[in-house]
């Protein structure tokens, strides 16, 4: 089947029967993510299977009209840009799969609120507003799986791979027979090689830079050994043996670490911080990670929450060790 043209979607051919789809204009910044469409193939899946393509319902319907019945949809993890519109795939008859425990986020926003520790800093109504901006709706039923499981759908084998630096049950997907590795939200977020992005994201308390760096190494080894094509939740199709995605992700973490190290060292020349909490409060005022001063209301509170955890990860796991100054 030839690659179709659908307004507001960019559809790229990865292999003759696998497409990477990107929604161009979205309701809000955390509304959508790119994913794979795996078309039917003789002696394999008789119906289309979709991997982690979180796009608005109108495009779900258009795609289903073109590629025929969709039997299964597989989600990579429970962040909002990966769960907001999954209900649309369920509404057209697809069986929904997601890794436990983040699979619960698809069933109830309260799980999304509690699992990442939002409740420690923000009221639930603010997360409700945030979810509404991104048009989140719940699913009726989700089939959970353990990260690392091999999923077999009508002869199609999908190996899930745990990449836990980003989130507690976040997975990538290896289609070994097709030589495609989808690293999901590992941090390769460039729509073309010359563009730039945020890179690896670790803005919840369960995230880990140490795990993240190990995940990047693991993904690179799998890619070079088993895949010819690399795709991600927010990036372009990469062909082996190009290792640019992994260099890019490592460099983003390194640069962020250097910024925080240098800032803390300068601050310690002028301030006598009594504890780590006081230091983080000062760092948050400086907008080192996000331009929070331009934001208002609960959106600023959400970014402040994320930045707090990103900074804390660098202070706890990076080269610089905070020392209390008396």
Image (cartoon, helix red, strand yellow):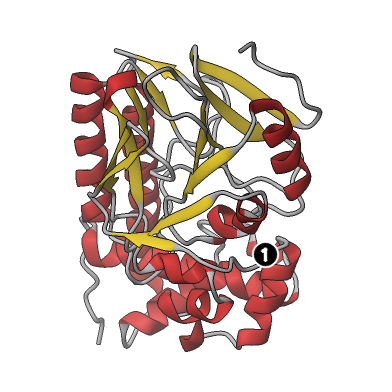
At 50% from the left and 86% from the top, the residue drawn is 119
Residue 323 to residue 286: above or below: below
Quadrant of the image occupied by residue 178: top left
Visible residue check, residue 261: yes
Quadrant of the image occupied by residue 23: top right
At 29% from the left and 12% from the top, the residue drawn is 241
Where's the C terminus, which quadrant?
bottom left
Judged left or right of residue 264, residue 92 is: right
Visible residue check, residue 285: no
Residue 40 to residue 106: above or below: above
User: How many numbered discs, if any?
Assistant: 1
Observer-nearest of 177 and 42: 42
Observer-nearest of 171 and 46: 46
Observer-nearest of 124 and 326: 124
Horizontal and vertical percent position of residue 168: 32, 63
Which residue is at the far right? 7
Judged left or right of residue 186, residue 149 is: left
Where's the N terminus, which quadrant?
top right
- Residue underneath mark 1: 136
Residue 187 to residue 306: above or below: above
At 57% from the left and 85% from the top, the residue drawn is 122
Residue 93 to residue 313: above or below: above
Horizontal and vertical percent position of residue 170: 35, 54
Horizontal and vertical percent position of residue 207: 33, 63
Horizontal and vertical percent position of residue 130: 68, 70
Circle 1 crowding by C-alpha within 10 Å: few under 14, some 14–19, many from 20 = many
SS class, disc 1: loop
At 77% from the left and 26% from the top, the residue drawn is 6
Quadrant of the image occupied by residue 147: bottom left
């Amino acid at each position: 089947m030839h690659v179709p043209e659908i307004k507001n979607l960019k559809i790229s051919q990865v292999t003759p029967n696998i497409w990477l789809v990107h929604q161009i204009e979205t309701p809000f910044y955390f509304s959508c993510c790119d994913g794979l469409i795996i078309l039917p193939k003789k002696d394999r899946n008789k119906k289309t299977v979709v991997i982690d393509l979180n796009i608005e319902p109108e495009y779900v319907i258009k795609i289903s009209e073109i590629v025929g019945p969709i039997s299964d949809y597989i989600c990579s993890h429970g962040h909002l840009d990966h769960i907001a519109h999954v209900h649309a795939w369920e509404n057209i008859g697809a069986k929904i799969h997601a890794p436990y425990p983040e699979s619960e986020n698809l069933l109830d926003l309260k799980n999304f609120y509690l699992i990442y520790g939002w409740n420690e800093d923000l009221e639930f109504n603010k997360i409700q507003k945030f979810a509404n901006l991104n048009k989140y709706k719940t699913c009726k039923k989700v089939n959970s799986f353990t990260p690392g499981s091999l999923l077999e759908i009508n002869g199609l084998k999908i190996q899930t791979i745990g990449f836990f630096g980003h989130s507690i049950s976040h997975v990538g997907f290896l289609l070994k027979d097709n030589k495609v590795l989808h690293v999901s939200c590992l941090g390769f977020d460039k729509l073309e090689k010359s563009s730039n992005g945020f890179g690896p994201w670790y803005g919840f308390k369960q995230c880990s830079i140490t795990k993240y760096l190990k995940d990047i190494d693991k993904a690179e080894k799998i890619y070079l050994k088993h895949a010819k094509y690399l795709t991600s939740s927010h990036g372009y199709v990469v062909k082996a043996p190009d290792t640019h995605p992994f260099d890019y992700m490592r460099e983003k973490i390194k640069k962020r670490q250097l910024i925080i190290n240098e800032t803390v060292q300068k601050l310690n020349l002028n301030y006598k911080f009594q504890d780590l909490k006081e230091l983080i409060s000062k760092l948050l005022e400086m907008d080192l990670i996000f331009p929070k001063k331009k934001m208002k209301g609960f959106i600023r509170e959400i970014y402040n929450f994320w930045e707090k955890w990103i900074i804390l990860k660098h202070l706890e796991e990076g080269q610089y060790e905070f020392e209390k100054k008396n």
